[in-house]
Image (spheres, rainbow, N blue to C red):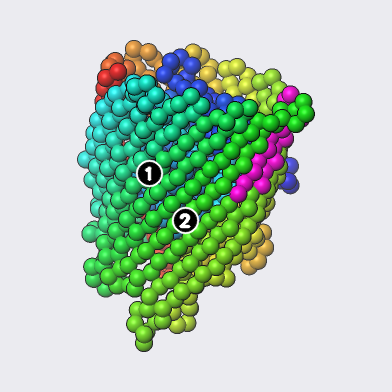
């Protein structure tokens, strides 16, 4: 890896990070930290050569964030963009700087199961009520070998609470903009049977006009433990809906940021997920786990077209998956060695129709096999080798508008890609260092298969869109100094045929070669018993390596991002948390030429105060304390000859009361 020496020195000097297993040892309810993301099996001491951090349940309680996307943006190297802000309904998470293609390059899992859809839809965050989350595992850098397509930037694995400990609680919150939420938790068991159930309701009028939003969800697990393992069934039902107030031109963004261009437009999603599975030991260090999953989501949009005529469109998506895997701690001579082998089989179907458009649909079948081996060459030196082979079959079709206007379209293709990685991790007393190299890939999603002839506007199948491929190099480590712990990484990712949307031509294209390089650093320091300080910083240089845009920055990707968290536990007088997030300036969306002005960076401050009055817990949150005006997403449109913005919410307050029955 080649960096400017001064920049590299600065990164290494700042290379400090949040420890993966930083729980609250004083809390007897805190479970031991197990990391699943490292090899797809729960481990207390992951040896993977990767920058992995964990957001614990205690971290979630101490955060002012009210939804998962807002919580994730406090971690190093993660940027969050939401068009309408309310409840995080349409938020996208960006790991290592993919801008408008973030959802297609950051893989989000729920208990190891993909939340990324086969099409271009954003994550349905309503599937995961924050109250049910036990921890969140973040692995930065490509996770392609273990998790496949969509993991070029990294993997975020949301782990829900599966304990059988008897618990029951209710929580209610009220806040600015007529925001109200309710959460219920119930868990327990009888003998081998156990259950975990959760429910979530949320409504808000929204900060902007027509930015109302609502969420409804129920989720849980029913399980049965036996001598060598368990069988279980995870489920979730959800609905979210919101107004879509549209973009604002620059003058309106500054003069009336709450105004809506589209006061009657709306969107809604309804869905369910069902995942039965088994996990059991086979003896002699062997373990088998498998899940069978079914998911359906129905989406609906109501909007006014350019002629102000009311339109409606609908989309239904069905997904099935089978994910068996096997772990064997077999040893190699006198060396400790473990091999994981598995299969990922996913099938997805999408069907859409609109009042002003013909019916269209797509089908996708993905089958992959993967293998990873970890061998202890020395007591403190671990070698990790992995490989994956994935086959993607895709079909897309669209009916004709009318025989005389536009013909029907149908196309199909089969693509195959392989990936590998290799790494070494060396651990000493209170420190660890690692290095790895590997490859990554991503296939076009089903929405990206649709294109239009620029001269006739007839629909065409985008069969010439190549899979995205790349190579990653990374070094990093962590250090434990007692009161302070640190984690860092420095990386470079070179991509070929990166898939993205070119707003200048209104098509999905393969970009010329691109590069992302930089470093991430986090620190967790307890200067006194009652104080905790967390600091993280990420530097990211994302640019084109060659072609007409050579040297230009990637749109919507900030070079600098960081956060500071201060926490004081005053016992009977309460616990107080301050979180400051800062994001640097970015090129506007679609500004590949870098000729427009820079989208202004921003810094926000959130506060939380909580009081433990058992069985009651009260908390007061102020978000965007200084009422900072900023836009996570903005661009320039030649069609309107102006900049356009999607402003973030202004200052808001929220009061929450939680009652713990037992």
The residue furthest bottom is 404
Q: Main secondary structure of the magenta part?
A: strand
Label number found at residue 347: 2
Depth order, front residue of 645/195: 195
* Residue 74 drawn at (x, y percent): 47, 36
Q: Is residue 254 visible?
A: no
- In the image: residue 21, left or right of residue 512: left
Vertical placement of 564 versus 417: above or below?
above
Judge by depth and name the residue closer to the eye, 211 or 467.
467
Residue drawn at 53 percent across, 62 percent down: 393
Residue 232 in the image: state x and y as whole percent: 41, 35
Q: Is residue 399 above or below residue 33?
A: below
| Magenta extent | 369-387
Residue 417, position as x, y percentages in the image: 63, 57
* Residue 554 is one of the magenta-drawn residues: no
Residue identified by numbered label 1: 274
- Tag 1 near tag 2, CB within 8 Å: no
Which residue occupies the foreground of this view, 524 or 422?
A: 422
**Quarter of the rendering containing residue 574:** top left
């Amino acid at each position: 890896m080649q960096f400017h020496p001064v920049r590299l020195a600065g990164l290494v000097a700042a290379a400090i990070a949040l420890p993966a297993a930083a729980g609250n040892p004083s809390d007897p309810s805190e479970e031991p930290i197990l990391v699943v993301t490292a090899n797809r099996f729960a481990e207390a001491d992951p040896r993977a050569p990767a920058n992995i951090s964990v957001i614990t349940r205690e971290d979630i309680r101490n955060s002012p964030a009210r939804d998962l996307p807002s919580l994730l943006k406090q971690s190093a190297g993660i940027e969050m963009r939401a068009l309408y802000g309310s409840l995080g309904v349409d938020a996208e998470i960006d790991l290592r700087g993919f801008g408008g293609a973030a959802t297609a390059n950051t893989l989000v899992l729920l208990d190891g199961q993909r939340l990324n859809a086969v099409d271009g839809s954003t994550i349905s965050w309503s599937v995961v009520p924050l109250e049910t989350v036990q921890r969140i595992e973040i692995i930065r850098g490509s996770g392609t070998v273990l998790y496949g397509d969509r993991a070029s930037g990294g993997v975020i694995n949301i782990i829900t609470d599966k304990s059988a400990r008897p618990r029951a609680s209710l929580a209610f919150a009220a806040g600015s903009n007529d925001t109200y939420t309710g959460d219920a938790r119930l868990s327990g068991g009888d003998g081998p049977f156990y259950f975990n159930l959760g429910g979530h309701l949320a409504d808000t009028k929204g900060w902007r006009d027509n930015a109302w939003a609502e969420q409804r969800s129920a989720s849980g697990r029913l399980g049965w433990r036996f001598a060598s393992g368990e069988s279980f069934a995870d489920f979730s039902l959800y609905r979210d809906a919101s107004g879509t107030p549209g973009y604002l031109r620059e003058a309106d963004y500054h003069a009336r940021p709450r105004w809506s261009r589209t006061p009657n437009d709306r969107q809604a999603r309804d869905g369910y997920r069902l995942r039965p599975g088994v996990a059991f030991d086979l003896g002699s260090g062997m373990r088998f786990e498998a899940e069978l999953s079914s998911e359906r989501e129905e989406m609906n949009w109501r909007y006014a077209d350019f002629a102000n005529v009311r339109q409606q469109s609908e989309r239904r998506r069905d997904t099935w998956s089978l994910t068996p895997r096997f772990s064997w701690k077999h040893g190699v001579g006198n060396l400790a060695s473990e091999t994981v082998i598995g299969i990922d089989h996913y099938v997805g179907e999408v069907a859409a129709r609109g009042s002003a458009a013909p019916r269209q649909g797509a089908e996708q079948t993905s089958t992959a096999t993967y293998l990873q081996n970890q061998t202890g060459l020395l007591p403190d030196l671990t070698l990790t080798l992995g490989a994956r082979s994935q086959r993607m079959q895709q079909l897309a079709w669209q009916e004709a508008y009318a025989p005389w206007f536009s013909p029907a379209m149908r196309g199909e293709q089969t693509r195959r890609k392989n990936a590998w990685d290799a790494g070494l991790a060396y651990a000493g007393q209170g420190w660890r260092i690692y290095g790895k190299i590997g490859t990554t890939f991503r296939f076009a999603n089903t929405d990206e298969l649709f294109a239009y002839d620029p001269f006739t506007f007839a629909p065409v199948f985008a069969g010439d869109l190549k899979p995205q491929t790349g190579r990653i190099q990374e070094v990093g480590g962590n250090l434990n100094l007692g009161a302070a712990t640190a984690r860092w990484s420095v990386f470079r990712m070179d991509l070929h045929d990166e898939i993205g949307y070119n707003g200048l031509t209104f098509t999905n294209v393969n970009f010329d070669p691109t590069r992302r390089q930089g470093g991430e650093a986090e620190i967790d320091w307890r200067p006194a018993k009652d104080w905790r300080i967390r600091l993280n910083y990420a530097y990211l240089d994302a640019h084109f390596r060659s072609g007409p845009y050579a040297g230009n920055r990637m749109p919507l990707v900030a070079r600098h991002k960081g956060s500071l968290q201060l926490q004081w536990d005053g016992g009977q007088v309460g616990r107080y948390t301050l979180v400051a997030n800062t994001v640097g300036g970015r090129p506007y969306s679609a500004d590949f030429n870098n000729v427009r002005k820079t989208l202004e960076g921003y810094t926000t401050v959130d506060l939380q105060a909580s009081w433990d009055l058992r069985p009651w817990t009260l908390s007061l949150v102020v978000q965007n304390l200084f009422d900072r005006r900023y836009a996570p997403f903005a661009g320039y449109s030649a069609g309107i000859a102006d900049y356009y913005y999607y402003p973030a919410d202004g200052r808001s307050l929220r009061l929450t009361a939680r009652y713990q029955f037992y």
